[in-house]
Every structure is written in structure tokens, then in C-alpha cells.
Amino acid sequence: MNNAPALTLRSITDDDMTAEKALRIGRMIGRSYKTVCIGSDTNPSSRMIKNSLISGVLSAGADVNDADIA
């Protein structure tokens, strides 16, 4: 099994992480990796951030596995 590096995106307040930032981060990740697995927690803003991150990864040409709530 390949042990790929893990990246955790966290912020102290919802103001720190925006959908636009998540989209840009997703694009950067998608340029570096062919396949990305993305999960989230139950925080109300997590769905928006996760979907933006997934959009960025996909727009960069990478595949995404959605782990849903982890």
C-alpha cells in the first residue's frame, strides 16, 4: 500500500477559510497529485469548503475520492 502524505485544512474561525481559498488550495493539490481522497467533519461549513476543495482538485485534472464524513 502506498503511504501518501496527508494534508489537514483547519481554521480557528469560519472567517479564516473561505470557499475561494479552498478552491485555490484544491487547484494546487490537483496539480501535485493524480488522485486525492477528501473527507470532512460535521461542522456546518465543512460541506461548502469540501465541495470547493473538490472543485479545485477536479479543475486541475486530478481524480477525487470523497470519503464523506470521517
Image: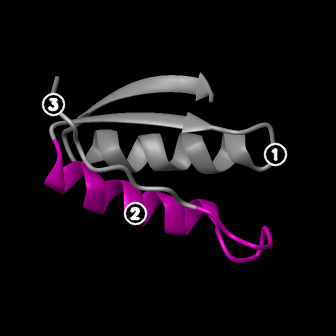
Q: Quadrant of residue 57?
A: top left
In the shown orientation, is residue 40 left or right of residue 39? right
Q: CA distance from mark 1 to mark 3?
A: 30 Å
Mark closest to the chain's N terminus, 3 or 2:
3
- Residue drawn at 80 percent across, 72 percent down: 13
The residues colored magenta run 10-33
Residue 35 falls within the magenta-colored stretch: no
Element at label 2: helix
| Residue pointed to by mark 3 | 2
Please rate how many residues cluster around mark 2, counting C-alpha atoms within 10 Å: few if below 14, some from 14 to 19, many from 20: some
- Residue drawn at 60 percent across, 24 percent down: 68
Q: Position of residue 65 (x, y in %)?
A: 38, 24
| Residue pointed to by mark 2 | 25
- Residue drawn at 17 percent across, 22 percent down: 1
Q: Quadrant of residue 24?
A: bottom left
Mark closest to the chain's N terminus, 1 or 3:
3
Give the numbered dot on residue 43: 1
Can you tell which of label 1 and label 3 is closer to the viewer? 3
Which residue ends up furthest to the right in the rendered image?
44
In the shown orientation, is residue 12 left or right of residue 49? right
